[in-house]
Amino acid sequence: MKAIHVCLLAAAGILSAGVAQADEALAKSKNCLSCHAIDKKLVGPAYKDVAKKYTAKDEAMLAEKVIKGGKGVWGQVPMPPNAAVKPEEATKLVKWILSQK
């Protein structure tokens, strides 16, 4: 019985890693990583800093900012709108970003 639990936990870990890699690939494909990095500030804030500042209750607001852009929260440089990002993609990206704690 214990072996079954260990196997299930290992499988869940592998599946989670696959989802994380897929969401990072989505961020790359939408050019998010041109201005953001996971662990350091580039033009925009590091995703780890975003994850520290916001929680799951902020997902809808953040997904809207991914699509419409934003300014003033992280400094003078505005984030341009990303009209090519669909709402479901924005939600997926935000969930991934908030998991970077």
Image (tube, helix red, strand yellow):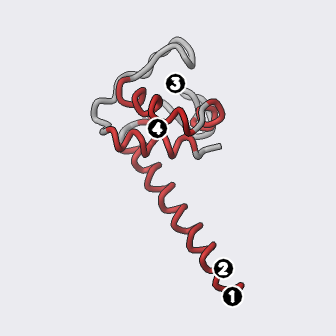
Circle 2 or circle 3, nearest the eye: 2
Tell me the element at label 3.
loop
Q: Which mark is residue 5?
A: 2
Q: Which mark is residue 33?
A: 4
User: Quick one: label 4, few (<14), some, or many (20+) residues within 10 Å?
Assistant: some
Q: Which mark is residue 43?
A: 3
How far separated are the C-alphas under marks 1 and 3? 51 Å
How far separated are the C-alphas under marks 2 and 3? 44 Å
Which residue corresponds to the image point at 55% horizontal and 68% vertical from the top-left?
Answer: 14
Q: Which mark is residue 1?
A: 1
The amino acid sitting under disc 3 is Val
Label located before the other in sequence (1 or 3): 1
Label located before the other in sequence (4 or 1): 1
How far separated are the C-alphas under marks 1 and 2? 7 Å
Question: If the image is split into quadrants, where does the N terminus sit?
Answer: bottom right
The reply to whether dot 1 and dot 2 touch (C-beta < 8 Å) is: yes
Label located before the other in sequence (4 or 2): 2
Label located before the other in sequence (4 or 3): 4
The amino acid sitting under disc 1 is Met
Which residue corresponds to the image point at 55% horizontal and 35% vertical from the top-left?
Answer: 57
Frontmost residue, 7 versus 37: 7
The reply to whether dot 2 and dot 3 touch (C-beta < 8 Å) is: no
The amino acid sitting under disc 4 is Leu
User: Quick one: label 3, few (<14), some, or many (20+) residues within 10 Å?
Assistant: some
